[in-house]
Image (cartoon, rainbow, N blue to C red):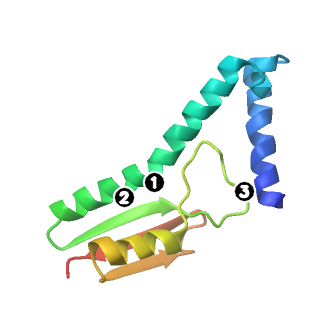
Amino acid sequence: MNPLGKKELLYFYNRHLRDFGDSPQALRWTPEGQRLRYEILVRIAGIEESMKNVLKKLFGLSREALHVDLLTYYIPQRNVELFYVKPEEILRFVITELSPSVILRHGTIKEDFFLSIYSP
């Protein structure tokens, strides 16, 4: 297991132990816990598509450019409750789906990256 994934997993279960105490629900060993886990995974899986749909709509409403600030995937420790984006993946999406005129700034602010998408 990669060290970053291990930290995230430990953070996740430590938080559940804190919230649920010393019970089977804390580790999702109950049928209800398993169902909740799958519901959360389904919601997470939809976040990326939702983000792309929102970007399409916002870009369609812009006259000259759309400027977006996103959380970068490439940081030492990620919070499991936040949505992080791999810059290369969103850049590929923007170039192929929205506009080839794009500027990506990564590293300007520790955990963020910025996209400026211009009308062609």
For badge 1, the amino acid type reads Glu
Query: Which is nearer the eye, 84 or 111?
Result: 84
Q: Quadrant of the N terminus?
A: bottom right
Location of mark 1 (residue): 48
Q: Residue at x 54, y 51 (%)?
A: 83
Q: Check disc 2: other Cα within 10 Å, few if <14, some if 14-19, many if 20+.
A: some
Residue 77 lies in quadrant: bottom right
Query: Which is nearer the eye, 25 or 119?
Result: 25
Q: Is residue 29 above or below residue 1?
A: above
Q: In front of the other: label 3 or label 2?
A: 2
User: Along the horizontal axis of the image, is 119 left or right of 114?
Assistant: left
Location of mark 3 (residue): 77
Q: Earlier in the sequence, mark 3 or mark 2?
A: 2
| Residue 29 spot, x, y in % from top left | 78, 23
| Residue 47 spot, x, y in % from top left | 46, 48
Location of mark 2 (residue): 52
For badge 3, the amino acid type reads Gln
Q: Label 3 to label 2, Cα distance in Å?
A: 24 Å
